[in-house]
Amino acid sequence: MLKMIDVYSGSPRSFATDPASDITMIKATQGTGYVNPFCNTDWDAAKNAGKLLGLYHYAGGGDAVKEADYFIDSIKNYVGQAVLALDWESNQNAAWGVNNWCRRFVDRVHELTGVWPLIYVSQSAIDQVANCADTCGLWVARYAYNQPLSWDYKGGNFSVAPWSTFTIHQFTGTDMDRNMVNTDREGWLRLAKGDGGATGASVPQSKPTPTQQSSQVHNTWKDELGDTWHAEDGTFTSNTQLHLRWGARPSASTIAVLPAGSKVKYDAWSRGSQFVYIRQPRGNGQFGYVAVRDAKTGEAYGKFE
């Protein structure tokens, strides 16, 4: 088995060249408006250190095809050289719990590149990505024992069904995300190259470059959850305590609890079965959501400007 470290902008830059590891997996993008500013730095350092390489996209839960396009457009210079992966987690992911989101993403990546990305997911949430098991390898997070501050790996004796086995096991994240990779160097390079059969694949020309999120072309659109959104710029002032969430659902995780009198700038609204939500633009191409009106009674929880 090979040893792998995964890194993002907040990681110490030295992690990318850790002498104990064989592979460096680097966060490249998130959503449709964020490129890791240290992606190139870590890539160059790891490559110069002789590491095998990987690049991953953190799912924001917007339109899956647009996120796949954004990922590949940002890392097209590295396609064929790095194993690609999708990071599927609940935090900052508006589509968490939507079981067909990853399938749409990986299909689009394969269409563009001929490469099937790995799927990163906690072992407890494998059911959300199970429909990718026929084409994609599994990068599973499972801390099955006391997390060692070392490479003291004790194996992965747990179910990953419907996969027969994992490709990567992230077994500790206490001080460093350590992973054991269930292949050899040649196998990793084959995963990076994919099947080479995509008509959309092209010779890459540029390294990842931060770009601004593209503006919404249409005034009304449907998101990945099937909700209809209407573009509208405004400011909402609450008259009661409200929850700012990562998704337009009562079950979505909370970003913050807003006290009465809070002002929220928004760029769109949607009427659900229970509430009317507004969408607050946030950094890195992400959005927050606030329920501002009872959809059944019409009662507003503040005023609009």
Image (tube, rainbow, N blue to C red):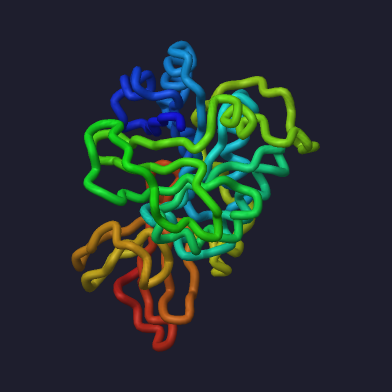
Is residue 37 positioned above or below 218 on the image? above
Q: How many marks?
A: 0
- The quadrant in which residue 187 appears is top right
Residue at 46 percent of width and 51 percent of height: 88
- Of residues 200 and 139, the one nearer the viewer is 139
Residue at 43 percent of width and 87 percent of height: 296
- State whether residue 176 appears in this view: yes
Is residue 198 positioned above or below 305 on the image? above
Q: Is residue 2 left or right of residue 188?
A: left
Is residue 260 positioned above or below 166 on the image? below
Residue at 76 percent of width and 36 percent of height: 200
Q: Is residue 16 left or right of residue 205?
A: left
- Of residues 41 and 172, the one nearer the viewer is 172
- State whether residue 233 appears in this view: no
- The quadrant in which residue 249 appears is bottom left
**x, y (%) of residue 272?**
48, 76
